[in-house]
């Protein structure tokens, strides 16, 4: 029987769109492993996550192995971010490597082992942050927005390894006014600022070039935008898959 992790989420977005802030409401933070690949950058809010500064990408594999072997101590794992994780792999294991072809093969293998073995065996909530970049597709005459990745992984993109991919965005209230659900709450502060940090959960005609994805029926049209709240997102996934 196949084993899957239905609490696996990729949160992509540009800098300053609220990716890291979306972790603020995670429950039981002291039971979450926060794997920081971004040179020790601090989260923008007080927290009790068990933070580990990653200096070698294979420490990510070790973190999942440890959590899997000690499931009673851990509720979830966060990688912040996949972009810096893969940049780190390139810097340490590919640059100046005399056997570049073999090194790039290990680059792809590292990510595939993480997603297809480590994450699957862990089987609990896993949140992966990633930066995105715009590139012009000359063949289709349109902009494509995706997580930048090199080597053979570029063909399908790392988004292909996730069933749920949301985009962190900063939207004006005018842009959000035709959407509304229990997942989207406009606060007094949002009203004062005139904008809100959100997750986009479904593609729109303006965002067909983005790799936002989710299982059919997980999000309705009214739920195209939701609060940038990772815990709210995980709860929604849990309801979708398990009805609770």
Image (cartoon, rainbow, N blue to C red):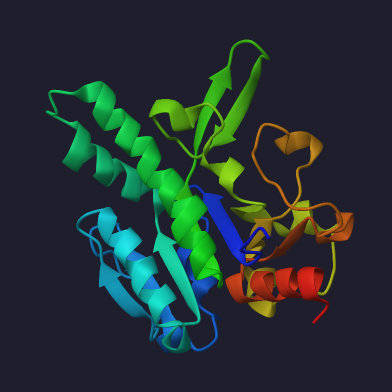
Q: Residue at x 60, y 41 (%)?
A: 160
Quadrant location of the C terminus in the rendered image: bottom right
Quarter in which the N terminus is drawn: bottom right
The answer to whether 19 appears left or right of 214 in the picture is left
Q: Reply above or below: 7 against 128.
A: below
Q: Nearer the viewer, residue 121 or 114?
A: 121
Q: Is residue 94 above or below residue 81?
A: above
Instruction: Judge whether residue 214 can be spotted in this image.
Output: yes
Image spot of residue 118 (x, y percent): 44, 60
For the residue pair 3 and 240, the one nearer the viewer reads as: 3
Q: Is residue 107 left or right of residue 229?
A: left
> Residue 43 lies in what quarter of the image?
bottom left
* Extreme-top residue of the structure: 139
Q: Position of residue 130 (x, y in %)?
A: 46, 50
Q: Is residue 83 left or right of residue 226?
A: left
Can you give x and y, in whole percent of width and height, for residue 61 in the image? 34, 60
């Amino acid at each position: 029987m196949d084993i899957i992790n239905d609490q696996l989420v990729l949160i992509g977005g540009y800098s300053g769109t609220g990716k890291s802030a979306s972790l603020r409401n995670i429950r039981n933070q002291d039971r979450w492993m926060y794997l920081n690949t971004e040179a020790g950058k601090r989260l923008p809010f007080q927290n009790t996550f068990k933070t580990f500064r990653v200096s070698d990408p294979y420490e990510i594999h070790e973190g999942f192995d440890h959590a899997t072997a000690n499931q009673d101590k851990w509720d979830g794992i966060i990688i912040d971010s996949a972009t810096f994780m893969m940049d780190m792999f390139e810097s340490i294991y590919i640059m100046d490597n005399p056997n570049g072809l073999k090194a790039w093969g290990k680059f792809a293998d590292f990510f595939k082992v993480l997603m297809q073995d480590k994450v699957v065996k862990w089987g609990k909530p896993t949140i992966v942050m990633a930066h995105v970049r715009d590139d012009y597709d000359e063949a289709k005459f349109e902009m494509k927005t995706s997580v930048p990745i090199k080597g053979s992984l570029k063909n399908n993109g790392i988004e292909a390894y996730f069933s749920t991919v949301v985009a962190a965005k900063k939207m004006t209230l005018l842009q959000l006014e035709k959407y509304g659900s229990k997942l989207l709450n406009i606060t007094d502060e949002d009203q004062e600022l005139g904008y809100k940090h959100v997750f986009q959960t479904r593609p729109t005609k303006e965002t067909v070039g983005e790799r936002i994805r989710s299982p059919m029926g997980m999000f309705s049209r009214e739920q195209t935008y939701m609060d940038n709240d990772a815990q709210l997102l995980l709860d929604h996934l849990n309801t979708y898959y398990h009805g609770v």
